[in-house]
Image (cartoon, grey):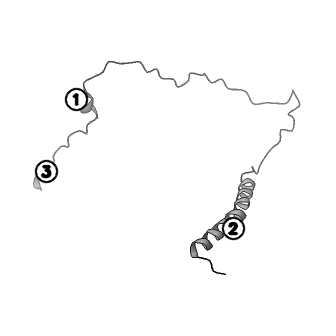
């Protein structure tokens, strides 16, 4: 039986995909399981100690941005442009 190189490669790829995909997914699922799972032994006990809840304001880190008047593009460009380099004695010698 004669197979062309492309059909042979396609069949091998299909075979490997069908067999390796489930194995790969199973390996990923096994690797993703946490190793040190601690069940809460007293989760049903209302007197069990619990960590204190911290208060975090909802607007912490909020920075208000108000509309501003447009400025001249030349002024803005001058602010972000690199500063001119100061010439030294070495530059003069070149």
Secondary structure under tag 2 reads helix
Specify the quadrant that holds the C terminus: bottom left
Viewer-nearest of labels 2 and 3?
2
In primary-sequence order, the first of circles 3 and 1 is 1
Q: Is residue 9 left or right of residue 65?
A: right
In 3D space, how far apart are the residues under numbered discs 2 and 3 (Cα atoms)?
A: 72 Å
Viewer-nearest of labels 3 and 1?
1
Q: Position of residue 51 (x, y in %)?
A: 75, 30
Alpha-carbon neighbours of circle 2 within 10 Å: few (<14), some, or many (≥20)? few
Alpha-carbon neighbours of circle 1 within 10 Å: few (<14), some, or many (≥20)? few
**Nearer-the-camera pick, 89 or 15:** 15
In primary-sequence order, the first of circles 2 and 3 is 2
Q: Position of residue 45 (x, y in %)?
A: 89, 30
As drawn, the residue found furthest toward the left would be 93
Q: Position of residue 69 (x, y in %)?
A: 32, 18
Secondary structure under tag 1 reads helix
Which residue is depicted at the point 14% across and 52% down? 91
Q: Quadrant of residue 72?
A: top left
Q: Which residue is mark 3?
A: 89
**Nearer-the-camera pick, 22 or 12:** 12
Q: Which residue is mark 1?
A: 74
Which numbered circle lies on residue 15?
2
Alpha-carbon neighbours of circle 3 within 10 Å: few (<14), some, or many (≥20)? few
Q: Position of residue 68 (x, y in %)?
A: 35, 18
Asked if the residue at tag 1 contacts the one at tag 3, i.e. Cβ–Cβ closer than 8 Å, the answer is: no
């Amino acid at each position: 039986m004669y197979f062309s190189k492309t059909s042979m490669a396609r069949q091998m790829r299909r075979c490997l995909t069908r067999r390796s995909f489930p194995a790969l997914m199973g390996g990923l699922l096994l690797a993703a399981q946490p190793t040190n799972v601690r069940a809460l032994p007293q989760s049903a006990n209302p007197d069990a100690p619990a960590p204190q809840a911290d208060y975090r304001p909802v607007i912490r880190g909020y920075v208000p941005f108000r509309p501003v008047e447009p400025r001249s593009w030349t002024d803005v460009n001058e602010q972000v442009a690199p500063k001119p380099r100061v010439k030294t004695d070495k530059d003069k010698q070149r």
